[in-house]
Amino acid sequence: MEAFLASLVFVVLAEMGDKTQLATVALAVEYNSVFLVWYGTTLGMLIADGVGIIFGVVMGKRIPERTIKWAASMIFIGFGGWGLYDTLPSSIWTPSVVITSLLLLATSIFMVHRLSAKRGSQLLESDKFCEIVEPQLPESSIISKENLVKI
């Protein structure tokens, strides 16, 4: 149930103002049909998300999660750069702007990598992980959460 709620909230928040939502608005205006556009876009999202979920499960068994996250972020950054290149006028794409942008992007990626690695090592070194222990109670006792988890 937790995975369902997390996915629901994440997708609702991520899709607000997204190109998919704007395309749905345009389709609703063009065809003036609430339910057919709703059904069509929902079915399209189900198919696209189903492919993504299957791909993610298969890849998750073969490739480390960290590698998948980095690859996804690089693809996302690539699409963002492509969108900027298509949208901005060609007069903006001077060598100095391109080099400065790439340096800023590389610095940002490096900093995120360093911060995530540092935070991960700090968590591993700390004693903040939960340890599940077997309760030492008579069978007639009521078991509470405090008896099961030792922090």
Image (spheres, rainbow, N blue to C red):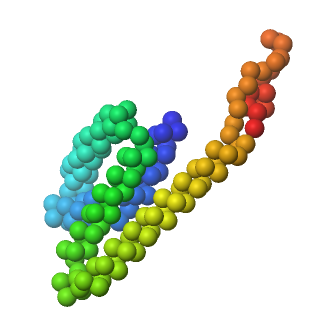
Q: In the picture shown, does residue 103 fall above or below 64?
A: below
Which residue is drawn at the image coordinates 54% and 54% (left, top)?
117
Q: Is residue 32 visible?
A: no
x, y percent for residue 49? 30, 44
Whole-percent x, y for residue 56 in the image: 34, 40
Res 83 seen here? yes
- Residue in view at x 19 percent, y 74 percent: 86
Q: Is residue 124 left or right of residue 72?
A: right
Up-down: is 6 above or below 57? below
- On the image, which quarter does residue 89 sit in? bottom left
Instruction: State the residue at coordinates (64%, 48%).
Output: 123
Q: Residue 6 at x, y = what percent?
A: 49, 46
Q: Nearer the viewer, residue 31 or 16?
A: 16
Viewer-proximal residue among 148 and 23: 148
Residue located farthest toward the bottom when viewing the structure as drawn: 91
Q: Residue lying farthest left?
A: 31
* 19 vs 99: above or below: above
Q: Say which residue appears at 26% left-offset and 74% top-offset.
A: 84
